[in-house]
Amino acid sequence: MTSSGPDSAEPGRQGLTVAKIAHLAGVSAPTVSRVLNGQPGVALGTRQRVEAVLREQGYQRRESGPAAILELVFHALESLWALEIIRGVEQVAREHGLAVVLTEMQGRLTPGRAWTEQVLARRPAGVIAVFSELTVQQQSQLATRSIPLVVLDPTGEPLHRTPSVGATNWSGGMAATRHLLDLGHRRIAMLSGPTGWPCCRARLDGYRAAMDAAGVPVDPDLVRVSTLYVEGGLRDGGELLRLPDPPTAVFTANDLQAFGVYEAARQAGLRIPEDLSVVGFDDLSFTRWAGPPMTTVRQPLVQMGAAAARMIVALAGGEELEQHRVELATELVVRQSTAPPPRH
């Protein structure tokens, strides 16, 4: 948007113009225009002052229409987990003539300022943040430009107004643990992911609930918080197997951890499932080719990506969402990595 004068600025909500915003922020209308469009050349302090006025005034920009782009933001692209979500998003985007712009933050949870400015300049139909955490300011910047935001697998408790998509992680954790209990296991370990993340905490809580319902005390030594990678499963799984009274089964927070436990068992000279049962979480495609094929909890990742994209399309079209929080069902997939505990 360009401005030939303060009165030519486009109106936002309730007739609030760029000229009015400029007056309230003590800057020129062209400066407000540059901030709105994510353009460079505005000092950080000035930009923050304009953003504060936009937020306080509840400004929402009226556009001729967004670009035919859907922004997809990942904290990391290191496994098929991310690819499955991308597939779901892309299916819906293609149906609606949208291109998908993918950003990977190399392990950071919050995008930087450069990303924010680029998104504001592109003016996409919406943003899907996967396992990422946009700041309150970033969420406000999107809202004032009428750019919808949907969070998939939020790393924190999603704000009430922010639509989000997830899976029934608690039920999945309970189903996995109950399966091991039904096989006769009592020394069941849990490798959790970071418990500050709701999905990991819910899987751990499901494990605890199943143990409690069965009247089996949880040994604190058998519960470990690990990283959601093969290395975490190898390191912490190895520690579990070196305990004086090791577990006979391990439930992990994702399939990558489970593969790490497979390797830890191999290094310890243990056979799966004869000596140790292992259950993963996600049901990534390679789990069926593991040796032995892995019992895991299927998370509907493609459908989760598609659900988030459909929410963006609806919001971009001015529709009200029926649900702001969507949780898709998980399912236990029993293969050959679980069996009754060994007899001693």
Image (tube, rainbow, N blue to C red):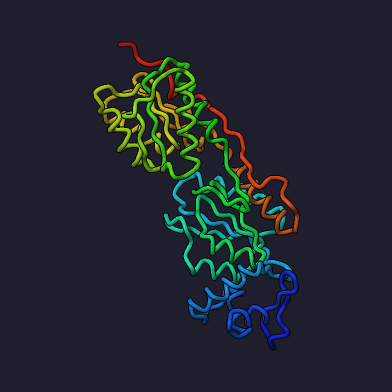
User: Which residue is at 55% across, 69% downward?
Assistant: 118
| Residue 81 rendering spot, x and y as whole percentages | 50, 44
The image quarter containing residue 28 is bottom right
Pick whichever, 102 or 44, lies toward us.
Answer: 44
Q: Quadrant of the N terminus?
A: bottom right
| Residue 166 rendering spot, x and y as whole percentages | 58, 42
Name, please, the residue furthest toward the top: 344
Residue 169 to residue 116: above or below:
above
Pick whichever, 37 or 19, lies toward us.
Answer: 19
176 left or right of 32 in image: left
Residue 92 to residue 301: above or below:
below
246 left or right of 340 in image: left
252 left or right of 146 in image: left
| Residue 252 rendering spot, x and y as whole percentages | 42, 33
User: Which residue is at 68% across, 63% downward?
Assistant: 68
Name, please, the residue furthest toward the bottom: 5
User: Which residue is at 41% across, 43% downward?
Assistant: 194
User: Which residue is at 72% across, 46% downward?
Assistant: 322
Pick whichever, 229 or 59, lies toward us.
Answer: 59
